[in-house]
Image (cartoon, rainbow, N blue to C red):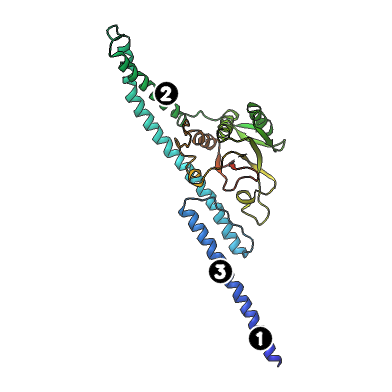
Amino acid sequence: MIPIIIITVVLAGVALVLFYWYRHQCLLRERAQIMRDAIRHRDFSFRLPTRGLFFGEKALQEALNDMGQEIQKLVAHSEVESWQKLTRVLTHEIMNATAPIQSISQAYLKRSDIKDSPYEEGIRAINDTSAGLAAFVESYRKLTQLQEPVIADVNMLSFCKQIATLYPQLQWNIDIPADFVLQADENLLRQVFINLTKNAIEAEAKAISLTPIPSPRRGETSGRKASLLGGRFEGGLLFSNDGHVIPLDVAQEIFIPFFTTKQTGTGIGLSLSRQILMRQGMTISLAENPLRGYNVTFVIEKA
C-alpha cells in the first residue's frame, strides 16, 4: 500500500514538473514571437519583463531589451544622416535652378517695355513663384545647417518654467526636481521644447506635463515604456500633452522630414528637433504608452 502511495506522489510530482516546464517553454516561445514581430515591424522599443525567468534567461532578456534600444538609436541616427544628405542635395539643385529664373524675371520686370504690357503679369507670376519656391527650400536648409551646440549645465526646473511663461494659455504640470541639471545647449534645447509645445497646441492640447524619466523597479525592465512607475531620476524627460492621439500609422512617420498631417505644416519640426538633440548626445522618441492622463508622451533622454 505504501509503495503505491509513494509511486503516486512521485508520478504526480513528475507530472507537475513537466507541466510547469512545458508552460515555461510556451511563455519563452511567446516572447520570441513578440520580439520577432517587433523587429519585422521595425519597432525596436520592446522591453519585456524579466520576472518569472531563470537567472540565465533573465540575463539574456535584459541583453535583448538593451540591444533593442541600441538598435533603435542607431536606426534613428542613420535615418537622420540619410535625410540630411538627401536634403542637402535637393536644396542645392533646386536653388541652382530657381536662382536664374528669379534673376531674369526681375530684370525683365524693370524694363520699360515690359511695364504695363501684356507680358508683365505673366513675368511677375514667374518671379513670385520662383521666389516662393526659393523661400520654401530655404526653410529646409535648417535641417543641414544647424549651429554647433555649446554644451553647458541647464537647470531644467528653471528652464521649463521659462517655456511655460511663453504659453500661459496652457495648463502646465512641471514635476521636476530643483537640482535636475541637464548638459545641453540651452538655446537649441529651447527650440526643441517650443516645437513640441507648438505641435501640442495645434493638436488642441490644453495641458502639458514635464516629468523626469522614472527608472524601472527592480525586476521590471519595462517600467518606462509601459507603466511609467516612479523612481530615481536618470537624466531624461517625459514631455506629455493631452492633444489628439497620434494614430499608429502616423506615429511611425512623424520624425521623417517633410512628413505632416497638417494642411499648413512644413513637416520639419520633429525631424529638426531630433537632429538638434542628436548633436547634443540625446534622442527623442514617441512613448508606446503615454503618461497616465495624457494622450501623447515624447521621451527625451541620453543617447
Which picture quadrant has residue 179?
Answer: top right
Which amino acid does the dot numbered 3 rest on?
Gln
Is tag 1's residue or tag 3's residue first in the polypeptide sequence?
1
User: Could you classify mark 2 by the number of other residues whose Cα lies within 10 Å: few (under 14), some (14-19), or many (20 or more)?
Assistant: few
Q: Is residue 155 left or right of residue 191?
A: right
- The residue pinned by badge 2 equals 135
Q: Which secondary structure lies at badge 1?
A: helix
Which amino acid does the dot numbered 2 rest on?
Ala
Q: Is residue 106 left or right of residue 2?
A: left
User: Could you classify mark 1 by the number of other residues whose Cα lies within 10 Å: few (under 14), some (14-19), or many (20 or more)?
Assistant: few
In the rendered view of the protein, which quadrant contains the C terminus? Answer: top right
Which amino acid does the dot numbered 1 rest on?
Thr
Question: How many numbered marks, from 0 up?
Answer: 3
User: Label 2 to label 3, Cα distance in Å?
Assistant: 60 Å
Q: Are marks 1 and 3 in contact (CB under 8 Å)?
A: no
Q: Position of residue 228 (x, y in %)?
A: 65, 48
Question: What residue is drawn where x is 42% and y is 26%?
Answer: 136
**Nearer to the camera, 135 or 283:** 135
Which picture quadrant has residue 233?
Answer: top right
**Tag on residue 25?**
3
User: Could you classify mark 3 by the number of other residues whose Cα lies within 10 Å: few (under 14), some (14-19), or many (20 or more)?
Assistant: few
**Tag on residue 8?**
1
Q: Which secondary structure lies at badge 3?
A: helix
**Nearer to the camera, 120 or 149:** 120
Q: Is residue 226 left or right of residue 122?
A: right
Q: Is residue 55 above or below residue 203?
A: below
